[in-house]
Image (cartoon, grey):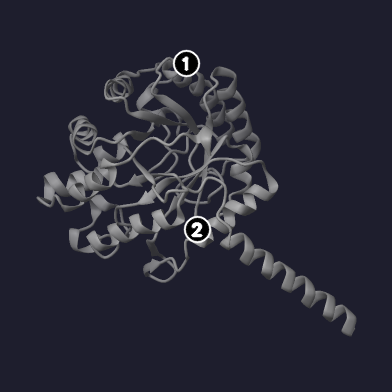
């Protein structure tokens, strides 16, 4: 009995030491200079929800904030409003405007894309069962990839968004179906495939396994329904190092970046349903700066700020340019990292 207890204690000790070592060891892909390149995400869908002129907002983001890199969700309801009738006008325009300004693009494709309700399905397909919807997604993907693979500023394809996270009004995505999507994309184009996962709530292993480049989210102050209040994650930057090193144990070295760095409020309702006073409880200017500093301490070479539509809304609807100007400072010195040199 004593021998068994001793063996168990030794195992626990070894595991604890291993965790500490993995958490303290800088993972592959950490910026050696301490500099992080900051890009943006733009959602046409969310800009419209915020009652903005989305085209004016998009051009203002490109011309005033001057991002070098942009993540752009290509929403199924925009592309295929009617079954088998594809319309790319809005996305042709956005991709071309980015190309003219030499902005690197990550195009997010599939059914589960950024912004609540996560699954974005056209009205005509909403009544289809899950298997039928998946079949239509596999038909949609070639339309998008073939449309935009000729653009040199399209850097990578993100397939689905946080596919293994149970969040939003969305059926789960099986690894089998995600593999089908990825295989299809790779058969059409040679650019890297990005797969993303939650920074705080997932282990990354299943997503990173499938990715050429892995993307993690990074949120600091969120709303908790269970606590009925805002909650700040008590996680040191080394928490992300630990998970990055765990991924490296199981799979080959892969670039890791922050696909969503929180730079807007997170409340119990949508932002377009809340007051500015409520919004400031989870995102004021001090919190904005703290989140930037936190991402720099983690040190992944690239981070895409989440909230550009909200900063624009604060500027044009609320007369508050502080977030817009702060983001401009953060982005101004950003350079596109070379993932091949990591």
Quadrant of the drawing holding the N terminus: bottom right
The percent position of residue 28, horizontal first and vertical second, equals 57, 47
Q: Is residue 270 left or right of residue 340?
A: left
Q: Is residue 204 left or right of residue 65?
A: right
The percent position of residue 48, horizontal first and vertical second, equals 24, 37
Cα distance in 3D space between marks 1 and 2: 34 Å
At 84% from the left and 75% from the top, the residue drawn is: 7
Q: Is residue 215 above or below residue 222?
A: above
Residue found at the far left of this picture = 319
- SS category of the residue bearing label 2: loop
Q: Is residue 53 left or right of residue 124?
A: left
Density class for disc 1 (Cα within 10 Å; few <14, some 14-19, many ≥20) is few
Density class for disc 2 (Cα within 10 Å; few <14, some 14-19, many ≥20) is some
Q: Is residue 169 above or below residue 188?
A: below
At 39% from the left and 68% from the top, the residue drawn is: 231
Kindly tell me whether residue 74 is visible in this rendering: no
Q: Is residue 300 left or right of residue 249?
A: left
The percent position of residue 47, horizontal first and vertical second, equals 25, 39
Q: What numbered label is drawn on residue 200?
A: 2
Q: What numbered label is drawn on residue 146?
A: 1
At 66% from the left and 41% from the top, the residue drawn is: 252
- SS category of the residue bearing label 1: helix
Hey, which quadrant is residue 316 in on the image? Answer: top left
Indicate which disc, 1 or 2, sits on the residue closer to the N terminus: 1
Q: Is residue 341 above or below residue 314?
A: above
């Amino acid at each position: 009995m004593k021998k068994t207890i001793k063996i168990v204690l030794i195992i626990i000790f070894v595991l604890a030491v291993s965790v500490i070592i993995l958490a303290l060891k800088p993972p592959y892909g950490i910026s050696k200079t301490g500099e992080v390149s900051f890009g943006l995400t733009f959602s046409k869908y969310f800009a419209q929800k915020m009652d903005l002129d989305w085209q004016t907002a998009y051009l203002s983001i490109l011309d005033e904030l001057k991002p070098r890199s942009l993540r752009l969700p290509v929403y199924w309801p925009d592309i295929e409003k009617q079954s088998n009738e594809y319309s790319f006008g809005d996305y042709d325009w956005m991709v071309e405007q980015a190309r003219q300004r030499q902005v690197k693009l990550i195009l997010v494709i599939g059914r589960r894309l950024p912004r609540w309700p996560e699954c974005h399905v056209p009205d005509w397909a909403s009544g289809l069962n899950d298997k039928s919807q998946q079949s239509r997604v596999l038909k949609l993907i070639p339309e998008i990839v073939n449309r935009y693979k000729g653009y040199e500023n399209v850097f990578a394809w993100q397939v689905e968004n946080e596919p293994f996270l149970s969040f939003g009004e969305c059926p789960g995505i099986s690894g089998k179906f995600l593999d089908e999507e990825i295989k299809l994309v790779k058969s059409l184009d040679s650019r890297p495939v990005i797969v993303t996962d939650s920074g705080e709530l997932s282990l990354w292993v299943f997503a990173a396994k499938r990715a050429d480049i892995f993307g993690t989210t990074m949120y600091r102050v969120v709303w908790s329904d269970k606590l009925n209040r805002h909650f700040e994650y008590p996680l040191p930057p080394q928490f992300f190092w630990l998970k990055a090193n765990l991924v490296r144990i199981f799979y080959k070295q892969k670039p890791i970046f922050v696909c969503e760095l929180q730079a807007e409020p997170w409340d119990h309702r949508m932002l377009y349903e809340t007051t500015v006073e409520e919004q400031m409880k989870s995102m004021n200017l001090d919190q904005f700066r703290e989140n930037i500093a936190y991402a720099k301490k983690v040190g992944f070479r690239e981070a895409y700020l989440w909230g550009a539509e909200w900063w624009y809304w604060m500027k044009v609807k609320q007369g508050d340019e502080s977030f817009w100007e702060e983001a401009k400072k953060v982005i101004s010195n950003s350079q596109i990292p070379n993932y091949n040199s990591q």
